[in-house]
Image: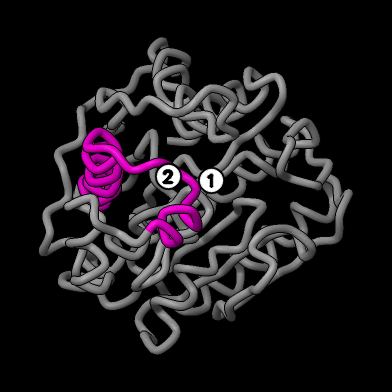
Amino acid sequence: MKVFYSDHHVVALPPKHRFPMGKYARVREAVARLPLEMVAAASATRDDVVRVHDAAYVDAFVAGTLDAKMMREIGLPWSESLVARTLGSAGGTLAAMRDALVTGIAGNLAGGTHHAHRARGSGFCVFNDLAIAAAAALDTVAKVLVFDADVHQGDGTAAIFADEPRVFTCSIHGKHNFPFRKMTSDLDLELPDGAGDDAYLAAIREGWAAGMRTAPALVLYQAGVDALAEDTLGRLAVTRDGLAARDRFVLGAARAAGVPIVLTLGGGYADPLEASIAAHAQTYAVAIEVY
């Protein structure tokens, strides 16, 4: 199984910044013992990005001239290294998509930046790698399922593909969590604060069944682990065993259906962070087990 990474682009954040940028390198270290082929991701090109994002927004971010208010909404300070990391992250999902269409499964140890809208970023997301990869996939496949199991709604993905019938967006998320102004996915399954394994897994199964009814030729699986009870931004009470059951179900169902699947890392903000790192690594251990 080929897995792409972009943590070689090191982004320095201010002390006590709430985004765990160091997580990505630590996840790569954690999965190094698994039989994975690790590949440094190439950068997404401008042409890749502007297929789903406004060109003026893209150019302003890359040049460092984006309005200060828009950078505050993203929540990360601009730097050349952030530009490189952002393009690398998007490139990783693009590369994983292309590899999965050949091999059946591939992953990106970053990505899942589902809060980025067409002309603005949000929630630590600059460019929407899921949307970029889905748009590129439509050059060769008829239908894409974006299956988003992160605890936060994939609002940017939903908005970008609101009028694109070839992409089915399914989001399983906390009802009262960020973003507080939700967009409309093709299917939104909302969970109350404190929901545990049973409710979460029931929603996963319901969402998967609905997505499969659209006969996708590719699944982009946003496998965030911020539904963990330990997560500081999650507000749910899912256990690591619950996340393992989620991954075993989704990956097993994709393999049984013969549908190529791409894993993106998504959110994970536990305190201590080791809980998130272990859960992300567990997703890849399950993938090896299933495939």
Q: What is the span of residues highlighted in magenta in the rendered image?
A: 68-97
* For residue 188, side relative to residue 37 (left or right): right
* Picture quadrant of residue 216: bottom left
**Up/down of 216 relative to 86, above or below:** below
Amino acid type, mark 1: Ala
Question: For the residues marked 2 and 1, what is the alpha-carbon distance in whole angstroms?
Answer: 6 Å
Q: Tell me which corner region of the image, top left, top right, bottom left or bottom right, holds residue 39.
A: top left
Residue, disc 1? 223
Query: How many other residues sit within 10 Å of disc 1, few (<14), some (14-19) or many (≥20)?
Result: many
Where disc 2 sits, the SS reads strand
Vertical placement of residue 211 versus 269, above or below? below
In-image side of 72 versus 6 (left or right) = right
At a point 39% along the width and 87% down the height, the residue shown is 165
Nearer to me, 121 or 142 = 121
Looking at the image, residue 198 sits to the left or right of residue 80; the answer is right
Locate the C terminus by quadrant.
top left
Question: Where is the N terminus found, in terms of image quarters?
Answer: top left
- At horizontal 54% and vertical 63% (from top left) the residue drawn is 154
Check residue 264 in the rendering and tell me which mark sits there, or answer none: 2
